[in-house]
């Protein structure tokens, strides 16, 4: 049987599942999906913005990629830029001039100057790509001053801060968006598309993580070396959970029909950063005095209310090629990443994966078939461009954003709670329901043109 035939059969078999999701989504003529059955107030569905006026806080490596994307989009004005390093603000201003845009106002008066930006500037959105510890203060300042907020990942590092984001977004009726670019990567979007069209049957299990040897980056004397390593001296938890968890949670409908229930976690010994110190730093280097508590491979298992399971890993201190695992398993098929491949029930030859390229012509997510996405150069292939494009389109069209504050909180609370379980011999830890029970009735995320 050809893949094509399998696809058709799967589609028929699982049409009940797909139609349940589809019945809750209403499509526009142009293909963009709207979930019009939602309660607008509940989803911070706000009036369309003809032009989105943006203030950007933290224009280091990743922030500069976003700035480049924003400068390339129609209907977006970069009005203000803030960073503790004046030369980085100057670089962003130069990028705006080079793009033929008005120069954004600079804010360089120290680590709380973003508060002045939030209070004084006429902006629709404050977007931050600062070090982790600044995400919550920036977003709270933005929302309390009547601006939508968007942040790089993770949104917060404590459960208390996750609640602060939820309560402030609800009170101020502002979007609070976790910008998880991996949700927009081509394989993850293809999995979502195929799942919703019924190929995977029922979602069952995912194996995801962030597996990236960051030892050299953590010890640099610039960029992330200035702040990221410090977190490894403070917390033995999954410091960076959302790259893998976000796409799995979206596919499983977390906060929209299913919910995280509890987790157990454990950590390996902490060796990688200590070894790096001893082997690569000069004897007099003060960083050799640092002690790290972060286990090199931090592993969690999450159980959802519908009984699904997610294996989640953080692994950034040991020699290894980059991966995010990315296994997604349904009752009728499996996707496995790095390299990307699929296997569906009754596929021929049996027991063997086929490459993503064999499925792409029929099953690429519609957002990935646009040339401007496929050819986007800024930041991690097309996914960073697509995430910025989608955020701006949602704001311009007055649509709910692809992720909301409940996703930001549910995915980010893992930082503290994986540490809590690992510190108590893997005792199960209940995961908070930031929707306060609304996950049961919230409709699925729109598949956006699929
Ligand atoms: N999604 C992704 O693929 C991805 C990739 C890289 C980084 N990130 C995230 O982006 C964020 C930034 O990472 P990066 O690699 O760009 O780091 P970076 O160190 O290059 O950039 C951080 C910037 O924030 C500035 N800054 C620090 N404190 C500030 C404050 N109080 N006010 C204003 N500016 C301040 C720094 O001067 C620096 O320019 C982090 O949250 C990181 O997790 C995400």
Image: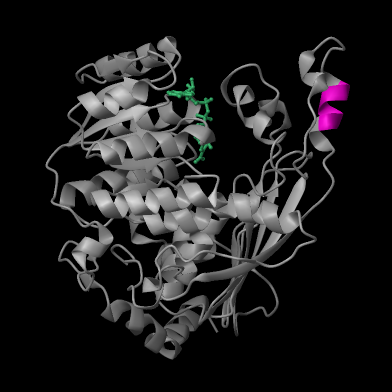
Q: Position of residue 66 (x, y in %)?
A: 38, 33
Query: At x 69% / y 72%, what residue is drawn?
Result: 352
In this view, the residue in front, 209 or 256, is 256
Q: At which x and y percent is residue 247?
A: 50, 59
The percent coordinates of residue 280 (x first, y second) are: 83, 20
Q: Locate residue 208 relative to residue 281 in the image: left or right.
A: left
Quarter of the rendering occupied by the N terminus: bottom right
Whether residue 406 is visible to the viewer of this picture, yes or no, is yes
Magenta stretch? 274-279
Considering the whole magenta stretch, tell me its main secondary structure. helix
Judging depth in this view, the residue of 418 and 247 nearest the camera is: 418
Q: Residue at coordinates 49% horizontally, 43% vertically from top-left?
A: 153
Identify the colour scheme used: one colour
Q: Quadrant of residue 80?
A: top left
- Write the residue at 51% across / 81% down: 202
Q: In the rendered view, would you say 264 is above or below 234?
A: below
Picture quarter containing residue 441? bottom left
């Amino acid at each position: 049987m050809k893949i094509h035939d399998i696809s058709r059969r799967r589609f028929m078999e699982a049409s009940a599942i797909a139609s349940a999701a589809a019945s809750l989504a209403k499509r526009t003529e142009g293909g963009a999906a709207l979930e019009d059955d939602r309660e607008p107030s509940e989803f911070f569905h706000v009036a369309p913005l003809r032009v989105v006026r943006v203030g950007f806080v933290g224009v280091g490596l990743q922030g500069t990629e976003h700035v480049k994307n924003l400068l390339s989009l129609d209907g977006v004005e970069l009005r203000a830029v803030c960073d503790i390093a004046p030369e980085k603000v100057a670089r962003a201003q130069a990028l705006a001039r080079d793009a033929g845009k008005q120069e954004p106002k600079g804010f360089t008066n120290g680590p709380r100057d973003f508060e002045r930006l939030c209070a004084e500037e006429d902006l629709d959105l404050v977007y931050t790509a600062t070090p982790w510890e600044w995400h919550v203060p920036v977003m709270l300042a933005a929302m309390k001053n009547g601006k939508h907020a968007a942040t790089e990942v993770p949104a917060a590092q404590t459960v208390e801060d996750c609640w602060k984001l939820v309560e402030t977004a609800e009170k101020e009726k502002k979007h609070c968006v976790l910008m998880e670019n991996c949700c927009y990567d081509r394989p993850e979007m293809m999995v979502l598309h195929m799942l919703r069209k019924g190929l995977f049957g029922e979602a069952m299990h995912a194996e995801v993580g962030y597996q990236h040897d960051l030892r050299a980056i953590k010890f640099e004397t610039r960029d992330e070396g200035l702040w990221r390593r410090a977190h490894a001296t403070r917390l033995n938890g999954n410091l960076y959970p959302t790259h893998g968890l976000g796409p799995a949670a979206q596919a499983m409908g977390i906060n929209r029909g299913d919910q995280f229930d509890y987790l157990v976690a454990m950590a390996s010994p902490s060796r990688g950063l200590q070894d790096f110190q001893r082997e690569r730093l000069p004897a007099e280097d003060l960083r050799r005095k640092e002690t790290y508590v972060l286990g090199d491979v931090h592993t969690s298992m999450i159980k959802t209310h519908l009984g699904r399971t997610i294996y989640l890993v953080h692994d950034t201190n040991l020699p290894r090629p980059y991966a995010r695992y990315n296994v997604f398993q349904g009752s009728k098929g499996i996707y496995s990443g790095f390299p990307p491949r699929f296997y569906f029930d009754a596929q021929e030859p049996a027991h063997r994966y086929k490459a993503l390229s064999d499925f792409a012509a029929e099953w690429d997510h519609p957002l990935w078939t646009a040339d401007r996405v496929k050819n986007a150069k800024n930041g991690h292939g097309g996914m960073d461009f697509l995430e910025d494009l989608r955020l701006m389109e949602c704001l311009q069209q007055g649509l709910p954003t692809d992720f909301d504050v409940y996703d930001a909180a549910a995915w980010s609370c893992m930082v503290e709670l994986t540490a809590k379980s690992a510190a108590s011999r893997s005792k199960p830890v209940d995961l908070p329901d930031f929707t306060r029970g609304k996950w049961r009735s919230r409709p699925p995320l729109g598949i956006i043109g699929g």
